[in-house]
């Protein structure tokens, strides 16, 4: 049976003191939960990973980075390798976020290299995909999603693919306050699962966790998570507040 996951993507927010405050508040709330119905992951900025890791080392939370280098090591000023992330207790890394695709020109070839180094280093990958507004308006969203998968993680073998979580994040819903309707989310998630069946097989498709991301908040998480093919969320803005994030975690 596949895992439910709620992951918080803090993006470029929080100094170290603010990060420790947030994660400590969250840890207190999570410690009070008798039973978590989902795995909880937090993805702070690089510099806050060690500090956050220390706070959550004896908690039920898991640590993710927001990015990693597309090279193994060497003269790449400003980059952080997958191996370095693994060495500081990171378990996951987000790859393919639409902000990285849009603002830093990350395309399929680069994303595939990042995925390969992450998996080789023993990290699990949260791979993001999703269409832009214009693509949806033109009815191209199914094709866009198929291509994003085909040229990257569908090239992996089955063993590596088992360490990938997918996050469907329609670009028009990220940070905009506009959420995909539960029906729109379910439609795409079911489509992604169908594509996984075609590329691998049904058993693998049923075992793959597919998250929804894009303006997910306490007021809409329950109806989004209630869909058969939605296995949780990748949460941006609402993960920066411990009460909101725990309310989303409790939406299962
Ligand atoms: P948002 O971001 O929840 O602030 O829309 C989601 C994401 O980009 O992962």
Image (spheres, helix red, strand yellow):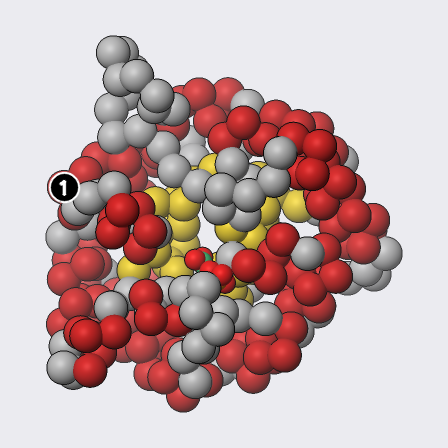
Q: Residue at x 63, y 53 (%)?
A: 240
- Identify the image quadrant of residue 58: top right
Residue 246: x and y, percent? 71, 62
Q: Residue at x 40, y 50 (%)?
A: 126
Q: Secondary structure at mark 1?
A: helix
Residue 17: x and y, percent? 71, 32
**Above or below, 4 relative to 46:** below
Determine which residue is flagged by label 1. Answer: 109
Residue situated furthest top in the rendering: 75
Observer-nearest residue: 7 or 180?
180
**Above or below, 246 relative to 179:** above
Is residue 79 visible in the rendered image? The answer is: yes
Q: Residue at x 39, y 71 (%)?
A: 173
As drawn, is 189 to the left or to the right of 153? right
Q: Residue at x 30, y 17 (%)?
A: 77
Residue situated furthest bottom in the rendering: 183
Instruction: Give the quarter of the figure containing the C terminus.
Output: bottom right
Is residue 37 visible in the rendered image? The answer is: no
- Identify the image quadrant of residue 196: bottom left
Residue 1: x and y, percent? 51, 65
């Amino acid at each position: 049976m596949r895992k439910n996951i709620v992951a918080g993507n803090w993006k470029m927010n929080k100094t170290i003191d603010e990060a420790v405050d947030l994660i400590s508040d969250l840890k207190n709330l999570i410690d009070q939960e008798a039973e978590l119905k989902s795995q909880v992951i937090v993805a702070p900025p690089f510099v806050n990973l060690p500090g956050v890791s220390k706070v959550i080392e004896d908690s039920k939370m898991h640590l993710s980075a927001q990015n990693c280098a597309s090279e193994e090591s060497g003269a790449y000023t400003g980059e952080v390798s997958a191996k370095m992330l693994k060495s500081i207790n990171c378990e996951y890394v987000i790859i393919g976020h639409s902000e990285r695709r849009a603002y830093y020109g990350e395309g399929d070839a680069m994303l595939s290299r990042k995925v390969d180094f992450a998996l080789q280093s023993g990290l699990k990958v949260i791979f993001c995909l999703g269409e832009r507004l214009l693509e949806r308006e033109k009815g191209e969203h199914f094709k866009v999603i198929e291509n994003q998968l085909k040229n990257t993680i569908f090239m992996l073998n089955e063993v590596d693919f088992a360490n990938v979580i997918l996050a469907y994040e329609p670009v028009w819903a990220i940070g905009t306050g506009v959420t995909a309707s539960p029906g729109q989310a379910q439609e795409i998630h079911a489509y992604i699962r169908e594509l996984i069946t075609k590329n691998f097989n049904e058993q693998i498709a049923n075992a793959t966790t597919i998250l929804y991301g894009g303006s997910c908040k306490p007021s809409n998480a329950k109806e989004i998570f209630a869909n058969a093919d939605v296995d949780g969320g990748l949460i941006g803005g609402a993960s920066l507040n411990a009460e909101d994030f725990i309310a989303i975690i409790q939406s299962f």
